[in-house]
Image (cartoon, helix red, strand yellow):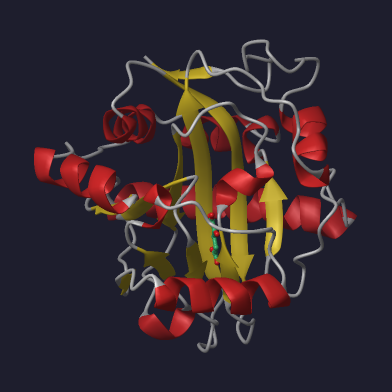
Amino acid sequence: MISGGMIDQLTVERFRADGHAVVHGLASRGDIDGYRPVIERAVREVAQRNDPQGRIDDYSRLFTQVTNIWRLDEGARRIVFARPFAVAAARLLGVPSVRLYHDQALFKPAGAARTPWHQDRYYWPLDTDLTVTMWLPLLDVTEEMGPMIFASGSHRVKVPGDVAISEGTDQRLARFVEAQRFPIITGPISAGDATFHLGGTLHSAGANRSDRTREVLTVIYYAAGTRVAVPANDNQRVDSEVFLPGVKPGEEAASEMNPVLYP
Ligand SMILES: O=C(O)CCC(=O)C(=O)O
């Protein structure tokens, strides 16, 4: 049973102004306790096969990363498709309907380094700014486990140059964030709460300095009706093949991998 909280107007306004927001009580602790073993099993199975799932970048020193767990298992599908999550995404974006781009379990082991600054939309061949990532921790994430870090308001500014995840880009974007004086928002987050951020919002996450794996499920949504863009880089070319199979630039981003999750 998925509970799900209502999103108040203040949270919606914050999200639109800042490019990110926390939604409290999106799931109950009981829901999360039920999700964890299902998601852990999916992650374990794919990780054991050493399957890169079409990825061309290797982030294995940062995470065990498993994409589209909804296709692996009926239990995982029910979690990823949970209506309260899609309702929250639609309400924050201010659109009547959202589709799934993909989900991603991100398990950051104890001792793993910080996630470099980046902007998600660099990776996505979608002709819209109306994309949102839900970052749902499967346990309480303390400061030492490395919660998300957002540069508030950065979605409104054009970021110069390449924004792919790399050490060099991390340093350049850190200088950019400082120079632009974006407020940096971070902090511990409880199981059942989730952060949401736009594809244009610069973000990173802390190192995991604890002795536990930081287990998170992310789900990425976009406004239904969005069209596929001409890929602007190699990452977008691969994303197009893997997450939007058979759909050409200019066509609606609506492959069998992108079901409508709301309404
Ligand atoms: O979990 C992390 O460390 C980073 C996640 C992230 O960048 C994202 O979900 O867009």
Return the x and y of residue 152 as percentages of the image width and height: 32, 61
Q: Is residue 109 visible?
A: no
Residue at image x 32%, y 36%?
A: 2
State which quarter of the image contains the C terminus.
top left
Return the x and y of residue 154 as percentages of the image width and height: 40, 57
Return the x and y of residue 93 as percentages of the image width and height: 33, 32
* Relative side of 176 to 6, left or right: right
Q: Is residue 157 above or below residue 243?
A: below
Q: Is residue 112 above or below residue 4?
A: below
Q: Is residue 228 above or below residue 10?
A: above
State which quarter of the image contains the N terminus.
top left
Residue 101 appears in which quarter of the rendering? top right
Q: Is residue 140 visible?
A: yes
Residue at image x 34%, y 53%?
A: 194
**Which of 134/230 is in front?**
230
* Relative side of 78 to 27, left or right: right
Quadrant in which ligand 1 is drawn: bottom right
Total numbered labels placed on residues in the image = 0
Return the x and y of residue 91 as percentages of the image width and height: 27, 29
* Relative side of 50 to 65, left or right: right
Residue 40 appears in which quarter of the rendering? bottom right
Residue at image x 79%, y 32%?
A: 242
Residue 147 appears in which quarter of the rendering? bottom left
**Which of 126/74 is in front?**
126
